[in-house]
Amino acid sequence: MRLRNQVGVMLAGLLCLRGTAGSPAVGKTSRQPAGYVYVVLWFDTEDYILPQSDDPAKRIADLLTRQGVRATFKVVGEKGRTLVRRRRLDVIQALQRHEIGYHANTHSQHPTVAEYESQLDWEVGAAEFTRRERPGYEDLRRIFGQAPTCYGQPGSSWAPQVFPALQSWGVKVYLDDAPHVGLEGRPFWYGGLLNIFHIQAGSDLRPNADWSNLAQVKANFQATYASLLQSGGGIVSLYFHPCEFVHREFWDAVNFAQGANPPRDQWKLPAVQAPPEIERNFRFLEGMVAFMKSFPRVRFITASQVLDVMPDRAQHHPFSIAELRQIASRVSPDVSFQVHQDYALSASEIFDLLNQFAASAIRKRPRAWHLRGMIYGPGWPGAELRQDVQVPWNQFVRTVLDVEGFLADHHQIPNVVWLGSKPVPPESYLVALAQAARALLAGEPAPDAVTLRPAHLAAARYVADDSPNLWEWVIFPPGFDAPQLMVLAKLQAWTLKPALLVDAHR
Ligand SMILES: [Zn+2]
């Protein structure tokens, strides 16, 4: 077969070219683990109803500034506008010394993010998030004089369509806590953003109902510190709300619970705690921060600084033939991410690299292989494959080039890969692609035929199945459920991979 021979000859050239170029990361001696416990301290600054919630935001910011700690204040758009309306320039200036994140435009007014996204598909959902939420983000940029670096959803109003929207705004970090996605309690990449989300370390450092557990959380931190250092360091995620230092009940629970949506002139003020209670709460925070600071290998970092200690080293990495061989050899019908010596690859990045390699081999255009930026998961469920499908090599070759065009144009994994008239799921195609790539990389002649077998996206197990406990937030209307959001979320498990720590603070 003419094409097969051409591919075989061309591959010999490629192997020679790549064998002398680049510096393969796999097998290279890795850097020592970071050896630091990085504490990301964040404050959801959201109450735009209770005027007494302005002062604690300022007091927290000043207290941390005095301690030399920079925190991340995730501010609600309406909160920022309210501070301006109340002429609280002093609060704005105190917060400006820290990093500003974004916590939605109006937070709990209905429909909240998951409510409006629950009825939308991938593309319209992303556009709708930008339409509704971008104005608040721009207001914060103007009010605080810095672009918010991260986003986190109101309550558990999480939705997958926000990720491409945030990426298009230049937001690179998702900072929050909820059960929708999680990678064994550690930071991860998902939807193109670094997720400090569903983090184990720090989850037992929160105050109890009467803020009386300072001794216990100190002991918990000591244990977390020791265990993180044992594994080379890690990230602690700890959050508070400035309003909880002064109120008895959340501002939104007294106004927007169970789907209620009263107009502004009917908003009620939540009850306030007594001054001694408020002082006790500040002593908790101050004591906790001073305690954490006393450990020699603790570093407080902001949301954007997590990108420095957990950079995505797969992006811009030149992949060698030896690396592609190793990547291809580790693809199985349980499609998932891979962790290599110096970088991790999501399933969509593996798909991208191997398809680029196969296409360049077919086109006889030897080149260096880099990730082509973000490749999202499919925006819609696709084909199912219940039994093996066999196609001739000449069809597989044409499909590789067709898929290459799809990736370049859509930056998304296709929900269906067409082998002539046969639609197959992208997971089955990836497994066959990896097998073909292995043969080509080994210098073997192309096979006569390619068999596509059932495969599944194993990485989807890190995305929760839809269930009522995902949507337990008191603000949601009774019985709120969003199964379609979790279907889309599982498709985005193509983009999931661990975030790896490097030692940026030697
Ligand atoms: Zn909130």
Image (cartoon, rainbow, N blue to C red):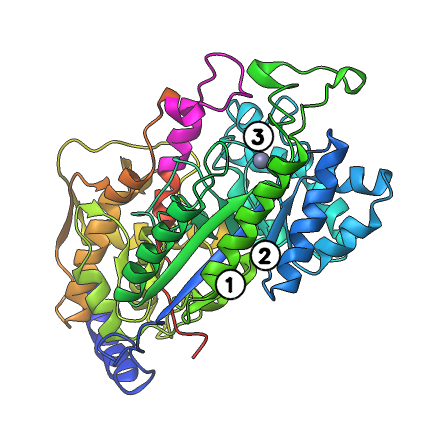
Q: Amino acid at mark 2?
A: Ala
| Measured Cα–Cα span from mark 3 to mark 1 | 30 Å
**In which quarter of the view is residue 127 placed?**
top right
Residue at the image point whose x is 17% and y is 64% from the top: 438
Quarter holding ligand 1 = top right
Mark 2 packing: few (<14 Cα in 10 Å), some, or many (20+)? many
SS for callout 2: loop
Mark 1 packing: few (<14 Cα in 10 Å), some, or many (20+)? some
SS for callout 3: helix
The residue to which callout 3 is attached is: 113
The residue to which callout 1 is attached is: 300
Farthest bottom residue?
A: 20
**In which quarter of the view is residue 66 placed?**
bottom right
The residue to which callout 2 is attached is: 71
Question: In the drawing, does residue 486 fall left or right of residue 155?
Answer: left
Foreground mark, 3 or 1, reads 1
Q: Position of residue 337 (x, y in %)?
A: 28, 53
Which stretch is magenta?
A: 469-490
Q: Position of residue 160 (x, y in %)?
A: 47, 37
Q: Are marks 3 and 2 in contact (CB under 8 Å)?
A: no
Q: Amino acid at mark 3?
A: Val
Q: Position of residue 170 (x, y in %)?
A: 61, 55
| Measured Cα–Cα span from mark 2 to mark 1 | 8 Å
**Which of pointers 3 and 2 lies earlier in the amino acid sequence?**
2
Does the rendering let one see residue 121?
yes
